[in-house]
Amino acid sequence: MKNLKRFEVWFITGSQNLYGEETLKQVDKDSKQIAAFLNESMSIPCKVVFKPVLKSAEEITGICTEANISQKCVGLITWMHTFSPAKMWIAGLKILNKPFAHLHTQFNRDIPWEKIDMDFMNLNQSAHGGREFGFICSRLRKDRKVIVGHWQDETVHRELEIWMRAACAWFDWQGMKVARFGDNMREVAVTEGDKVEAQKQFGYSVNGYGVGDLVNVINQVTNKQIDRTVDEYRSLYKVDVPKKQSESLREAAKIEVGMKKFLADGGFKAFTTTFEDLHGLVQLPGLAVQRLMAEGYGFGAEGDWKTAALVRAMKVMAAGADGGTSFMEDYTYHLDPSGMKVLGAHMLEVCPTLASGKPSLQVHPLGIGGKADPARLVFNVPEGEGINVSMMDMGNRFRMLANPCRVVAPDAALPKLPVARVVWEPRPDLKTAAAAWILGGGAHHTGFSMALTKEHIADFAEIAGVEYLLIDDDTTIASLKKDIRINEVYYALAKTLK
Ligand code: MN
């Protein structure tokens, strides 16, 4: 999970035969240099692969076909060094099913004012070559990212980085398997949805498994495996479990080993549980879920498969970046008008990648569910910028809703709240953000991250072709209502445009 270098982004350059051999050689050389430079940039997470300069419709269609079937290529960077007549691009772009970013750069950063002649002008033609390419992409209604600036500019690299992370998460969703242990929490609406439509649009499949199937695997866990896992707990966490509860801790370790085996054997990348269906499980899998999330698994509680898939995508986007990512729930409010905030948590399942310092491992009774006392990691989260993201099935489409926030310290210690928790102030403020979230139909479950920004989520939503609604510093209730109405019309009509 940590390394996205196993994924490739292909660097492709558009030109044409009209320029003659000498200019094309130069174009080839310059493109190679840019691709190599990007590949070595610390902020570029994927491997950038140079592809020979494209001069004809046949070559363009060929590379698009190759990209479509590549098991490593997550997307393309397109660059028009010179003019590349865009009718040549129609067939290729029509079939291309990988995302692309149009890098609108020029090999020479500056105009050599004293020396510039027509040769320079004919080689450095991105200014109009990029427009010709842009037209055909727009004419074909191709969603893509356009990045403008010199290829050595750090801000360009940062934009590319964000887009690449989103492209990796999209690639990861294709063919992804999500396991559901038990069904939906009874009568809950927002966690439901059309799984067939999700598979068609997003590429991941969601299938249910009997809790008994999981319990069978858990029951095969050996004492030796349990010992090893408990030792790991002792090395990683502050274990605050009295002797009389040590059996609970061993039970949690047993559940973790079994769950991990079930998920690994089945090739799953995300999963859901539900505390209403725990037949044969001695305790709610809290610690196991926390640790599996830390390994990169997506998770949704109460059968919430959309959030499980979303958390996995956010984990992939955040791979190797600073800051944690987790399943989350808006739990309780602090409505003091001088500083309104949200306390986010779940019954147990918050990912320890968010923790400030060493988490404390504890065993306590759970108020609901009627099972034995479960183990869980308890911790606070450092202050900083974060984002909550939610995904809902609106009937005729899916919607992704995002709301950046500022994570703050709790006003006081929370000695009687033995769960991991995060306190945040949503942007622009809780009063506006909560009203906007509710008007947008946003779920109580979210993917929460301190490694990602609204830019990552916007890029991902665009690649996924899913509605994106943002609540941030510029949001007013009037503007959000307008966004919702425009989106209702757009998503009904857009299907007829492509
Ligand atoms: Mn919940």
Image: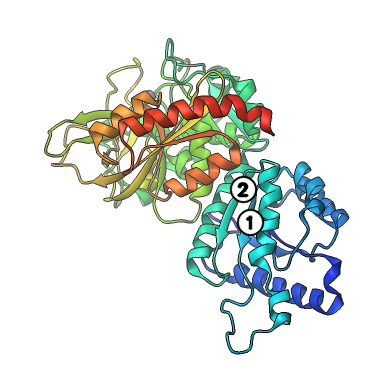
**Residues at badges 2 and 1 in contact (C-beta under 8 Å)?**
yes
Mark 1 nearby-residue class (10 Å; few <14, some 14–19, many ≥20) = many
Pointer 2 residue Cβ closer than 8 Å to ligand 1: no
Depth order, front residue of 20/275: 20
Residue under circle 2?
A: 144
Depth order, front residue of 369/33: 33
Q: Position of residue 418 (x, y in %)?
A: 24, 34
Whichever of callouts 2 and 1 sits on the residue coming sooner in the sequence is 1
Residue 439: assigned label: none
Figure check: 102 above or below 397: below
Residue under circle 1?
A: 102
Q: Position of residue 55 (x, y in %)?
A: 83, 63
> Image quarter for residue 377?
top left
Quick check: 325 left or right of 69? left
Residue extending farthest to the top is 187
Figure check: 312 above or below 212: below
Label 2 sits on a secondary structure element that is loop
Quick check: 450 left or right of 356? right
Residue drawn at (73%, 68%) of the image: 82
Depth order, front residue of 292/34: 34
Q: Is residue 265 visible?
A: yes
Which amino acid lies under the numbered mark 1 shown in the image of this protein? His
Residue drawn at (36%, 24%) of the image: 439
Q: Position of residue 95 (x, y in %)?
A: 78, 42
Depth order, front residue of 470/453: 470
Figure check: 100 above or below 284: below
Residue drawn at (79%, 66%) of the image: 53
Label 1 sits on a secondary structure element that is strand
Q: Position of residue 124 (x, y in %)?
A: 68, 73
Q: Is residue 206 visible?
A: no
